[in-house]
Image (tube, rainbow, N blue to C red):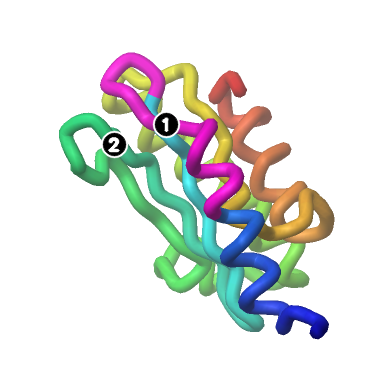
Amino acid sequence: MKLSKLDRRRRIQKRIRKIVKGTPQRPRLSIFRSNKEVYAQIIDDVNGVTLAATSSRDKEVATQKGTKIEKAALVGEKIAKLALDKGIDTVTFDRAGFLYHGRVKSLAEGARKGGLKF
């Protein structure tokens, strides 16, 4: 029986989360991609807290003209800026079961361009 898209993503997500853990020294950059928006947050899994979060719904990004891929790059740059302000320069990237392509890749490249290392 074929898995639905959501079931397939959940299975991949579990496999990734077994390996990728966020620590205070190296938190996890987790993303979520819906049909219209893209969200990013930096998480410390040891203490169970979100250190920084942003999305394409924020005013700075939503008012910009461009495609969803271009907005994802802006979200990546913004999350990198928020992280650097909090003293975080290295993270682990959690693509949450999404393929590393399109908006996910654009967000990751934007975060790297903003100064995050992963």
Quarter placement of the N terminus: bottom right
Residue at which label 1 appears = 21
Q: Going 59% across and 46% down the picture, which residue do you hit?
A: 15
Q: Is residue 118 magenta?
A: no
Q: Position of residue 111 (x, y in %)?
A: 60, 36
* Mark 2 and mark 1 residues within 8 Å of each other at the beta carbon: yes
In the image, 15 versus 117, the foreground residue is 15
Density class for disc 1 (Cα within 10 Å; few <14, some 14-19, many ≥20) is some
In the visual, does 20 lie left or right of 2? left
**Position of 5 relative to 11 (above/below):** below
For badge 2, the amino acid type reads Asp
Instruction: Looking at the picture, tell me which residue is in the foreground, 44 or 83.
Output: 44
The region drawn magenta spans: 14-26
Instruction: Name the residue at 72% across, 70% down.
Output: 68
Task: Choose top left, top right, bottom left or bottom right for residue 28.
Answer: top left
Q: Residue at x 50, y 33 (%)?
A: 20
Q: Secondary structure at mark 2?
A: loop
| 109 displayed left or right of 29 | right
Instruction: Find residue 2 and report its horizontal and vertical position in percent.
Output: 81, 82
Residue 65, which numbered label?
A: none
Circle 1 SS class: loop
Q: Is 44 on the left or on the right of 114, as rendered?
A: left
Q: What's the amino acid at mark 1?
A: Lys
Identify the mark at residue 45; answer none if there is no mark: 2
Q: Quadrant of residue 44?
A: top left
Left or right: residue 29 versus residue 88 is right
At a point 72% along the width and 38% down the height, the residue shown is 109
Residue 69: x and y in percent read: 76, 62
Marked residue nearer the N-terminal end (2 or 1): 1
Q: Give the answer, above or below, for where 73 lies relative to 11.
A: above
- Residue 25 painted magenta: yes
Q: Nearer the viewer, residue 74 or 105?
A: 105
